[in-house]
Image (tube, rainbow, N blue to C red):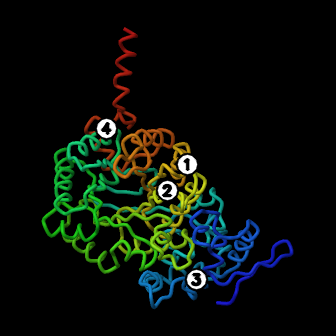
Amino acid sequence: MAQISATLAGKTFRFLDLKHVLACASPRRSGDELAGIAARSDAERVAARIALADLPLRTFLEDALIPYESDEVTRLIIDTHDRAAFAPVAHFTVGGLRDFLLSYEADTDRLHALAPGLTPEMVAGVSKLMRNQDLISVARKCTVVTAFRNTIGLPGRLSTRLQPNHPTDDLRGIAASTLDGLLYGTGDAVIGVNPATDSVPNGLALLDMLDGLRARYDIPTQTCVLTHVTNAIELINRGGAVDLVFQSIAGSQAANAGFGVDLAILAEAQAAALALGRGTAGQNVMYFETGQGAALSAEANFGVDQQTIEARAYAVARHFQPLLVNTVVGFIGPEYLYDGKQIIRAGLEDHFCGKLLGVPMGCDVCYTNHAEADQDDMDNLMTLLTVAGVTFVITVPGADDVMLNYQSLSYHDLLYLRSNFATRPAPEFEAWLARMDMTDRNGRVNIPEQHLLRRMIGHDAA
């Protein structure tokens, strides 16, 4: 397409193409600066947003950021685009879409119907025109419901992944962390372990232990060993108790190749998991993780800004009807998201884009120890995401993952979110907690350490 331009304070700013204007319109972040595609000044950033706001949405269907002929993710986006769903907004500009999304008319039903008509580039573009409160307001109106052994994403619900990682995959250590998490009411989204040793025999041992625990106590949740998708296929072939197939994905064919996957492999894995028929409430069998910076770190971003190419990963996820998707927002490091401010913004962007595209979007609210961030920043992000209606968050013992060596949320953090925002777990899991006498008459978790406190208070009163 021809150059795009905008005039600001008497100065005309020119942008080479759609890819360039999207990159310059992004909020400041270290990854785009590392790639040499960020706006060179705040003035250029504002000018890019002015130019972006006036672009027709049809532009994104006519001007592929990565060529159709060379990228299967682009082909997936274009070939599966629902033009009937797009029709109600087809006449909008990017700015017009923003105004519509923030209007009363854009309610939950309309946004659900619109999702198949939006492309990742459209939603990434409109997010660049939004403040944080706008991202929260729109995402909160989006409801995406999925199911396997329980039902995820219902209004007023907040689910959690219980992540009991261990540096040596010690089964007793993982079991102890799992029990700890269950006692705090976590784990309805999934009990998911990142294996320290990514081998099929190790995966089988972990699966057997987790599935045995789940079956023994009749826990209405799903388990997952977050091994490579090809390992998951082999685990299924060997009779492993595979509930969910996991895979990290990105927004370009080349970046996915860096993960050792393509769309055909994902389709094969999905078919294998579906054939097991292990779900009782539904058959959403895929679990995907993403994160801004993945494509850039693989040198497979093709000059696309990291937030836009991240949104393209959600088109891959959407195609396979997953139970769960989450951005591991601060995991890659400060080279891509430098500090707490950038991590918070990225988390809200990712959640907004995923939900608007119809993806069951969660977030690993996290940071690495060399980022300019701390647990107060994570408190802020988890609070904002809960207000925004995030599908699920990840919790680990003490907020410190001793295997992956990064900081996330703790089991205790979930109690804060539940008590202050009246969010509840998946209904089947909530009923199980009550049946196991793990909640009180108000549905609140019987916090283990408070048993001692109540006994002390009772003793003093006596």
Q: Label 1 amino acid?
A: Ala
The disc at residue 60 is 3
Q: What residue is shown at x 42% (from left), y 79% (from top)?
A: 254
Q: Are marks 4 and 2 in contact (CB under 8 Å)?
A: no
Q: Secondary structure at mark 3?
A: helix
The disc at residue 183 is 4
- Report crowding for label 4: few under 14, some 14 to 19, many 20 or more residues within 10 A (C-alpha): some
Q: Secondary structure at mark 1?
A: loop
- The residue pinned by badge 1 equals 373
The disc at residue 3 is none
Q: Are marks 3 and 2 in contact (CB under 8 Å)?
A: no
Vertical position of residue 453 compared to residue 48: above or below: above
Which quadrant is the N terminus positioned in?
Answer: bottom right
Q: Label 2 amino acid?
A: Gly
Residue 322 on image: x %, y %: 35, 67
Nearer the observer, 29 or 133? 29
Which quadrant is the C terminus positioned in?
Answer: top left
**Marked residue nearer the N-terminal end (4 or 1):** 4
Nearer the observer, 236 or 95? 236
